Amino acid sequence: MRGTNPKGEVRIMKPKVFIARPVPPEVEAYIGKHCHYSKWDRPEPIPRSHLLESLRDVNGLLTSGGKINSELLDHAPHLQVVSTMSVGYDNFDLDAMRERKILGTNTPSVLNDTVADLIFALILDVARRVSELDRYVKDGSWKRGDVESLFGLDVHHKTLGIIGMGEIGEAVARRARRGFEMDILYHNRSRKRRAEADLDAVYCSLQQLLKESDFVVLMTPLTPETVRLIGERELSLMKSTAVFINASRGATVDEEALLSALQNKRIYGAGLDVYEREPIAPGHALLRLPNVVTLPHIGSATHETRYQMAMMAAENLVTALSGHTPPNLLKELSV
């Protein structure tokens, strides 16, 4: 950014940035090298009112959640770019940002393997009842002679159905095919020829996938078309021995329909990392079911991956504010 001093000489002015959540010291130092910045450094989420007050004179915002909508943009008249430390950006009001010519970036790819690891942890946990039986032992309930009451399901050589075969879906499929010799079905907006060639994945309708899969993994982005994509009808198509895994967005599932299917044993179990409302209410009925594993939305939450995501988001931000096209510019907001 350019400005002039009292003598009329041109000088380079650093852009102003607000960091809306704590980031590693190295990431903060990188931003500080290129920008003037202020930050929210407390562990709890930044209050909306404080965020809005902090945006009056900033050119860039580094965040990982919260609505980027007209209300926020009205408080940020100098804003040029919003960089989110996540792959999902359903919190962006793309129309409002496009109208104001504000760039948006995300952090794809870097978290693929970490999220895929967690998805497979949920598959194994639910199938072999790991969390349930951990509590069983620690509660002192284990008795000599307990046998069939502790049985679970095999994972190897079963059929895995993936709804939303993006990069994370492909990473899950690789683990399933090469590690557990599973058959792979997938449903996606478009065919993934590479997955079909490398992993013998079979493209099919959503209905066929739900009917034939032993494990169903939902990994679609949240769009108007995918809100409550999985509801009562879809769950009714699944095997009574099937396991459902959701690591996408909570709103892609009709939670009441899922609860009913689990309570009535129309499906075997579920592993959930996301919910319609987060945090999920402590008294929610899903939390009382032994055949459900519930995690606090930790798909990419490892030290290594979160560091890489924060640095990637910072690089996106600095590149955009330097007048160049950031490497992870959202296609919907490209100019």
Image: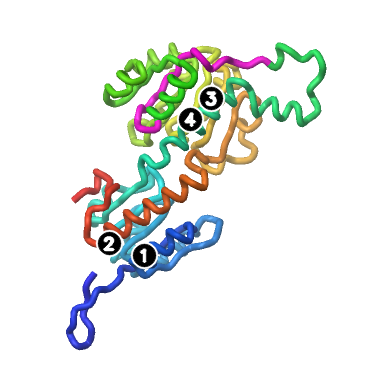
How crowded pointer 3 is (Cα within 10 Å; few <14, some 14-19, many 20+) is rated as many
Q: Amino acid at mark 4?
A: Asn
- Provide the secondary structure element on which disc 3 rests: helix
Q: CA distance from mark 2 to mark 1?
A: 9 Å
Q: Label 3 near label 2: C-beta < 8 Å?
A: no
Indicate which disc residue 246 carries. 4
Q: Measuring from the top left, give residue 66's x and y in whole percent.
A: 43, 51
Disc 2 versus disc 4: nearer the observer: 2
Q: Label 1 near label 2: C-beta < 8 Å?
A: yes
In the shown orientation, is residue 69 left or right of residue 176?
Answer: left
Q: Amino acid at mark 2?
A: Leu
Q: Amino acid at mark 1?
A: Val
Indicate which disc residue 321 carries. 2
Magenta residue span:
151-168
Q: Earlier in the sequence, mark 1 or mark 3?
A: 1
Q: Colour scheme of this structure image?
A: rainbow
User: Mark 3 highlights which residue?
Assistant: 123
Residue depicted at 42% across the width and 40% down the height:
111
